[in-house]
Image: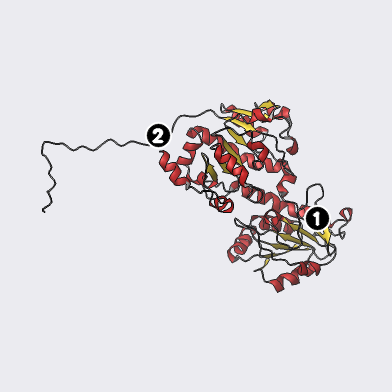
Amino acid sequence: MATAKPFVSPSLTYETMEETLDIKPKHESLSIGIPKETSFNENRIALTPDGVAVIVANGHRVHIESNAGEGANYTDKDYSEAGAKIVYDKKQVFESEIIVKSAPVSEEECEFLRPNQYIISPVNQAVMKREILEKMMHKRITALSFENLKDASGHNPIVRSMSEIAGSAVMLIAGQHLSNANNGKGVLVGGISGIPPTKVVIIGAGIVGEYAARTALAMGASVKVFDNSIYRLKRMQNNIGVRMWTSVIEPKILAKQLKTCDVAVGALSGSGGRTPLVVTEEMVSAMRPGTVIVDVSIDHGGVFETSMVTTHKKPTFTKYDVIHYCVPNIPSGFARTASQAISNVLMPLLLETAEDGGIDKTIWHKINIRTGIYMFKGSLTNFYLSERFDLKFTDLNLLIASRR
């Protein structure tokens, strides 16, 4: 059977349709709530009074729970002078559209969450529980995590700042625990004429390792860095601008260097999972008495086999006569600096969200922010979390496209 040919009538006229442009909506007024953190060892606050003042000056409302800034030495007066409203009931803080936290959402806080709220906080996969995610999904929450948030240049600004703080703090902590006052061996980190410099071994050449090396060199120590990525070792040398002693992680070489060092720093990052254990108990037992180990990677399991989590109240323990400092969340011990670093990232982000007309519009216009969203309107959009807790994963890009 012959197919009919398409027929075009000469009486019809064909015209191009007008182009419709995606126009940004008008500025939206935000209501932001900052609860007081109750989780262990958390002293930071996600917005400083200076950050709040800018947000309020742009026509937004900020509700903050009384004494929320206490850990970072910010008073209620500082916040009320910045234009925030001080609230004495946690439940009242959670009536805001946007909740900004410096610690992960806790089970207790899940009860206060309102449907369709937007939360900005760390997610901390190590302590996250399935029940918390399920409650958030049920309330159709949209959540953005500090750890995965990327800026326009593709970097993680908050993680980077926290790593810089932790790296810089490492040598101050080690110096403190080498002194007699803390039952150390009574050694100054270095820089004294005629006395051989203190030897520091850093395992990991990421941002933490780089800042630890920078501080150690500035204090006059001799630094040796181990990492399995030649690229990271090269980048570190170029950034610091000094040719340093570097090596890939080869157990025999590492054991030899650890035997004679005064400070050993664990600064490997566990990309998504646990950090590799590269220093065995045997290697630690061969280290000199009074040596200080600072395991910054304890947040992700630790680099040293002998590491066990400690607290800011009791930060060290001794094993094989070696002092171990294994406090997770080191930046929280320098809470004011850490709070300023977080606030510097979140304050512009919140103003951007308002300008775009809400978080849904921001995600549509700014692709880099999508990496930080781990839940969108109750759908889990983080693959690691969905795999770990066996929950349904939904692709964020598909979700956003389907809503346009």
Q: Nearer the viewer, mark 1 or mark 2?
A: 2
Give how far apart the Cα atoms at labels 1 and 2 are: 56 Å
Coloured how? secondary structure
Note whether residue 142 is visible.
no
Q: Quadrant of residue 404?
A: top left
User: Could you say which is closer to the camera, residue 359 or residue 74?
Assistant: 359
Residue at image point 48% right, 42% down? 366
Residue 267, image x and y in percent?
A: 68, 58
- The disc placed on residue 241 is none
Query: Percent x, y for residue 18?
Result: 28, 35
> Residue 375, image x and y in percent?
54, 43
As shown in the figure, which amino acid type bears the numbered disc 2? Ile
- The residue that disc 2 covers is 23
Image position of 189 with respect to 82: above or below: below
User: Quarter holding the N terminus?
Assistant: bottom left
Residue 185 screen position, x and y as percent: 87, 60
Which of the pair 59/329 is nearer the observer?
A: 329
Horizontal side of 221 relative to 117 (left or right) equals right
| Residue 265 appears anywhere in the view | yes
Q: Label 1's element?
A: helix
Q: Nearer the viewer, residue 191 or 27?
A: 27
Name the foreground residue: 97 vs 391. 391
Residue 242 located left or right of residue 222: left
Three-letter code, disc 1: Gly
- Is the residue marked by circle 2 packed among few (<14), some (14-19), or many (20+) residues within 10 Å? few
Other-residue count near label 1 (Cα within 10 Å), few / some / many at <14 / 14–19 / ≥20: many
**Badge 1 or badge 2: first in the primary sequence:** 2
Identify the residue at horizontal 14%, vertical 36% (top origin): 12
Q: Secondary structure at mark 2?
A: loop
Where does label 1 land, which residue? 175
